[in-house]
Amino acid sequence: MSAVLLLGVSLTACTTKGALDYGSEPTTSNYTEPYVSGLRAGKPYPSAEDVCQTIEPNKATRELDKAGFFLIGCPKHERGAIADRVAEGASIVAQSRHWTRLQLPDQASL
């Protein structure tokens, strides 16, 4: 029991404060602009009709920027869109306030 408590305390101590302080459960059932969650949106992804957006690098995403990958974000309450992106090969890498951040291989690097 105390080992579990210590593990929980040590994991909490390593948690990044700020834009990554959120879980995967939706924090709203309404659409909010990415900037409300600390993200800089690029364009809709994968097409103009989609709710997911490419995410431009900024201070909140710096730790997730990796060569050969790009970030997209989807509103957390859009579980179908998130599932579609995961089915296409995206990996969930972080949670922002109202958005889930996913990472995809950069098509230009393939």
Image: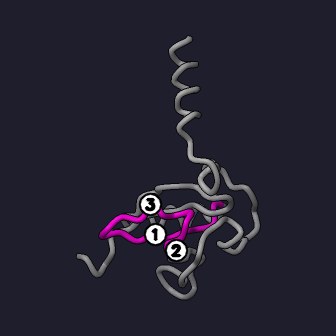
* Residue linked to disc 2: 55
In which quadrant of the rendered image does the C terminus lie? Answer: bottom left
* Residue 15, numbered circle: none
* Whether residue 87 can be seen here: no
- In percent of the image, x 76 and y 68: which residue is there? 30
* Residue 64, numbered circle: 3
As measured in the structure, the alpha-carbon distance from the residue carrying label 2 to the one carrying label 1 is 5 Å
As measured in the structure, the alpha-carbon distance from the residue carrying label 3 to the one carrying label 2 is 11 Å
Q: Are marks 2 and 1 in contact (CB under 8 Å)?
A: yes
Q: Residue 5: percent from the left, percent from the top?
A: 58, 19
In magenta segment, residue 62: yes
The tag earlier along the polypeptide, 3 or 2, is 2
In magenta segment, residue 13: no
Q: Specify the segment rendered in magenta.
A: 56-76
* Residue linked to disc 1: 71
Q: Are marks 3 and 1 in contact (CB under 8 Å)?
A: yes
Q: Secondary structure at mark 1?
A: strand
Q: Residue 65: percent from the left, percent from the top?
A: 41, 65
The tag earlier along the polypeptide, 3 or 1, is 3
Q: Secondary structure at mark 3?
A: helix
